Image (cartoon, rainbow, N blue to C red):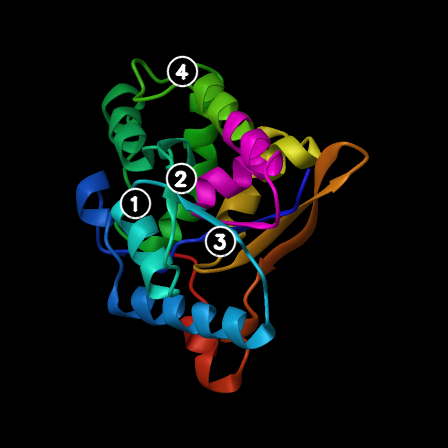
């Protein structure tokens, strides 16, 4: 097994309330990606293998980081949160927040209903999301050399849930904490991938870049 560094994509369209319009980086998101790429270059980090999902925001982030050869894998894609939020509103009367702060209470409710099978015909079952997260990370970990993986916050929180045995509420709190272009490392210990780094943003940790430490 080898270690895996998960990277959340740069800031996307914060005004979006559907999957398609959300799936593009903001100007700040492009800048965050460039800063992360420069940091990794200057630190001498070696990642002979780079992966990303097939979503536009994943591909744009990897490109902005300066990654030349990237393996795209749809199993690294995010859950369709906005689609499920729309279903929750239609089926359970849970209004979709109109301001970013509202998602702090909204996201755990969606996760809980989804994991309990209380959303009719979701785009993907909770069990399928769990399964694809585990399968793709197991395959990447079996390869040669450290891997860099550009993905999304929900995927990262599921990876951490599996590594740490978190319940659904714990996973939701973790998902809300994950910053754009943050790094999270899973290291093989005793035959299992264990978290040794969470939510690191050294490329944004200077006084002139604190404004770029975004969650949404």
Query: Residue at (42%, 64%) from the top-left corner?
Result: 214
Query: Residue at (44%, 19%) from the top-left corner?
Result: 128
Give the x, y percent position of residue 109.
44, 32
Residue 169 numbered tag:
none
Residue lying furthest bottom: 208
- Left/right placement of residue 68 relative to residue 171 reads left
Magenta segment includes 192: no
Magenta segment includes 143: yes
Asked whether residue 108 is in view, the answer is yes
Camera-side residue of 172 and 19: 19
The Cα atoms of the two marked residues, 3 and 4, are separated by: 30 Å
The Cα atoms of the two marked residues, 3 and 2, are separated by: 24 Å
The answer to which of marks 2 and 1 sits earlier in the sequence is 1
The Cα atoms of the two marked residues, 2 and 1, are separated by: 7 Å
Residue pointed to by mark 2: 106
Tag 2 secondary structure = helix
Q: Residues within 10 Å of mark 3 (few under 14, many from 20)?
A: many
Residue 7 numbered tag:
3
The answer to which of marks 3 and 1 sits earlier in the sequence is 3
The answer to which of marks 3 and 4 sits earlier in the sequence is 3
Magenta stretch, residue numbers: 135-159
The answer to which of marks 4 and 2 sits earlier in the sequence is 2
Residue pointed to by mark 1: 97
Look at the image and tell me in which quarter the N terminus lies: top right
Tag 1 secondary structure = loop
The answer to which of marks 3 and 2 sits earlier in the sequence is 3
The answer to which of marks 4 and 1 sits earlier in the sequence is 1
Residue pointed to by mark 4: 118
Tag 4 secondary structure = loop
């Amino acid at each position: 097994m080898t270690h895996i560094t998960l990277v959340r994509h740069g800031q996307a369209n914060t005004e979006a309330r559907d999957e398609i319009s959300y799936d593009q980086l903001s100007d700040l998101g492009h800048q965050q990606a460039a800063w992360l790429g420069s940091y990794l270059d200057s630190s001498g980090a070696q990642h002979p293998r780079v992966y990303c999902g097939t979503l536009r925001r994943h591909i744009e982030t990897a490109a902005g980081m300066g990654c030349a050869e990237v393996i795209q894998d749809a199993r690294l894609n995010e859950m369709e949160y906005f689609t499920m939020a729309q279903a929750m509103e239609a089926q359970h009367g849970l209004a979709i927040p109109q301001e970013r702060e509202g998602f702090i209470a909204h996201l755990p409710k969606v996760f809980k209903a989804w994991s309990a099978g209380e959303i009719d015909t979701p785009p993907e079952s909770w069990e399928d999301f769990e399964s694809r997260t585990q399968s793709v990370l197991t395959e990447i970990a079996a390869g040669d050399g450290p891997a860099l993986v550009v993905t999304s916050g929900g995927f990262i929180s599921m990876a951490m849930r599996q590594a740490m045995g978190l319940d659904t509420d714990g996973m939701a709190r973790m998902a809300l904490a994950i910053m754009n272009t943050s790094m999270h490392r899973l290291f093989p210990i005793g035959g299992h991938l264990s978290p040794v780094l969470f939510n690191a943003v050294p490329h944004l940790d200077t006084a002139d870049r604190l404004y770029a430490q975004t969650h949404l």
